[in-house]
Amino acid sequence: MALIDSTYLTGELYIANTASGPVADTLGTFIEKYSRELLNKVLGIEMRQSFLSGLEAASPEQRWLDLRDGLGFATNGGDLEWVGFANSQLKASPIANYVFFKYNIYLIDQSVGAGNLHPTVENGYIASPIKKLTRAWNEMVLMLRSLVYLLEAEKELYPEWYGRCNMDMDIVNTVNYMGL
């Protein structure tokens, strides 16, 4: 079950030609694959399963809706906002950023029968996507850090959350375009 669709890939996350055809098919596959991967990296397998099952219930618990749609919350450090895994009002989601990142990495080289090719264009040149990818990744990291703060502040509400020890910590580390 994918929480987002191609309509979340707008603004700085825009991917052209997503309405139909090969781009739409490939993007749909990426959304399915990388939604699951991101949720596993952040929540762990058990909590991901509980979260998705909770959303499919006839009457989902508010805690699962809050993870999906986002909410404001208070911590010892002040008020924070979790944007949600699929905020349909803002069309914002760390999943969208992750999919955008993975899709653009895929576009850098294409596999064909003769091996891997770097695409070329007429009347122009292919610009490096590194700065866009860095911004998308770091924006996702900030969203996910607020999720971690939420889950740690609401441990009683989310007993499935085992803390940071159950996370892939690379998912909440920023990057820079120089690779440092």
Image: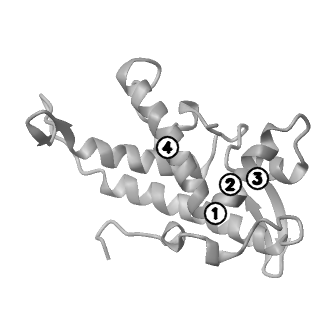
Label 2 element class: helix
Residue 87 seen anywhere in this rendered image of the structure: yes
Q: Residue furthest left?
A: 114
Image point (75%, 61%), residue name: 81
Q: Quadrant of residue 91?
A: top right
Name the residue beneath numbered marker 4.
Answer: 33
Which quadrant of the view contains residue 38? Answer: bottom right
Q: Earlier in the sequence, mark 3 or mark 4?
A: 4
Distance from disc 4 to disc 1, alpha carbons, whole Å, reads: 15 Å
| Residue at x 38%, y 27% (from the top left corner) | 23
Q: Is residue 16 visible?
A: no
Residue holding disc 2: 48
Mark 1 lies on a secondary structure that is: loop
Q: Amino acid at mark 3?
A: Ser
| Residue at screen point 40% across, 31% down | 26
Q: Residues within 10 Å of mark 1 (few under 14, many from 20)?
A: many
Q: Give above or below for 24 relative to 158.
A: above
Residue 121 has which mark?
none
State the quadrant of the N terminus. Answer: top right
Q: Which residue is mark 1?
A: 44
The answer for how far apart the CA atoms under marks 1 and 3 are is: 10 Å
Mark 2 and mark 1 in contact? Answer it, CB < 8 Å. Answer: yes
Estimate how packed mark 4 is, as few (under 14), some (14 to 19) or many (20 or more) residues with alpha carbons within 10 Å: few
Query: Residue 175: horizontal and vertical position, in percent?
Result: 41, 69
Q: Which mark is residue 50?
A: 3
Which element is circle 3 on?
A: helix
Q: How many residues crowd mark 3 within 10 Å: few (<14), some (14–19), many (20+)?
A: some
The correct choice, above or below, for 147 with respect to 53 in the image is: below
